[in-house]
Amino acid sequence: MKDLVVPSLGESITEAVIGKWLVDVGGHVEADEPVVDLETDKITVQMPSPVSGALTEQKYAVGDTVRVGDIIGQVDETAEGVKAAGTTDVAAPASGTAPTPAVATEPALPSASQGQGGVERDAMGRLLSPSQRKAIREGKAKIPALASTSTLAPVRPPGKEKAEEVVPMSPLRRRIAERLVMAQQGSASLTTFNEVDMSAIIGLRKLYKDEFLETHNVKLGFMSFAVKAAVEALKASPGLNAEVRDSAIVYKKKYDLGIAVGTEKGLVVPVLRDCDTRSFADVEEGIIDMAVKARTNKLILDDLIGGTFTITNGGIYGSMMSTPLLNFPQTGILGLHNIVKRAMVIGDSVEVRPVMYLALTYDHRVVDGKEAVGFLVAVKERMENPQRLMFGV
């Protein structure tokens, strides 16, 4: 008998939720065949069977929380187990004739009762309509039946939807919710804002986008400018590239930035590593690779752990302004938003410029307002003067 033991799930992850049992008790499993989905707040991991045999026990139900090292089931390698049945066609009758499909029949009609003026009521004593009485007098075999009031569906005015729908949270959504609440309760989060005139970046992209694509086989996007600007700003604001660990502050000496990606299952934050040493093309390629892996469910746990700071771009959904939540235990997250033409005062005149709002949420236990505002100003200055990013100044 072999135990199914929850394996190590990665840095800082100590527990998971049983998302789905992929094999029933008594079912056959092959060695290394996935037996159960384990959902963490970061990713869904399929846990394989260590041996071939029969699954004899499921110690936890779907939705239960388990910890690393817990025994969640057992596989008997001496038993064969029942193999999962495949899809089969409906067997034909022994006579060789094809199976007869089920045919919906009309409900039996209540018998009618006679009154002095002819048939007036059905067997349930309800008055028949003139058309029903006429149908009976003319010898029609069937008359429209009046449904019992006890079986009538509730009448809803045309076009009016039901008032509410109750849908249970998935285990993954519950874990995400728990983590977000923990981030709010476990930190002193605060958000500060600024704006960026995107004219210079838009002009630079327009000038070099074709040559960049031809040279690097990847498009030059806005995110590479944001990533490079954030790295330079983080170097001057180390408190935002840190985390609180017990009663100590851990300052990270690397720049592994989480880039939030929306998927069908929810928001995931894969990590783009060594952003300080990547070129613009390397950043763009890395972001595209992460997004494709996230949306095709090919991310592995190593793709999601170890981030030091996070960038989320609500602008792709049309967001003008937001207050992003910290990606706990990180101390900072930068929110980007949509680019909209706005009136700006340039010198002594008013001009229409493409503007993007920035939002920085930070942990006030580690970062003071001065450092947070300084970070946003540094990002703003570098995005408004992208040549600074080219020369690392």
Image: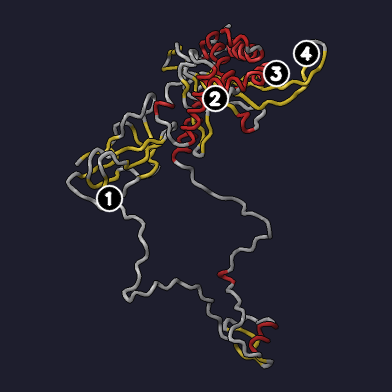
* Residue at 41% over, 17% down: 246
Residue 346's disc number: 4
Q: Residues within 10 Å of mark 3 (few under 14, many from 20)?
A: some
Q: Position of residue 331 (x, y in %)?
A: 51, 18
Residue 27's disc number: 1
Report which quarter residue 340 is drawn in.
top right
Q: Give amino acid for label 4.
A: Ile
Query: What distance separates the C-alpha of mark 4 from that of mark 3?
Result: 12 Å
Describe residue 156's horizontal placement relative to residue 57 as left or right.
right
Mark 2 highlights which residue?
Answer: 218
Sooner in the amino-acid sequence: mark 1 or mark 4: 1
Q: Position of residue 185 (x, y in %)?
A: 51, 26
Q: Is residue 1 above or below residue 15?
A: below
Query: What distance separates the C-alpha of mark 3 from that of mark 2?
Result: 22 Å
Q: Nearer the viewer, mark 2 or mark 4?
A: 2
Q: Can see residue 188?
A: no
Q: Nearer the viewer, mark 4 or mark 3?
A: 3
- The outermost residue toward the left is 78
* Residue at 43% over, 15% down: 247
Sooner in the amino-acid sequence: mark 2 or mark 1: 1
Q: Nearer the viewer, mark 3 or mark 2?
A: 2
Q: Give amino acid for label 2.
A: Val
Q: Nearer the viewer, mark 2 or mark 1?
A: 2
Q: Give amino acid for label 1.
A: Gly
- The outermost residue toward the right is 349
Sooner in the amino-acid sequence: mark 1 or mark 3: 1
Disc 1 on helix, strand or loop?
loop
Tag 3 near tag 2, CB within 8 Å: no
Q: Is residue 252 above or below residue 35?
A: above
Mark 3 highlights which residue?
Answer: 199
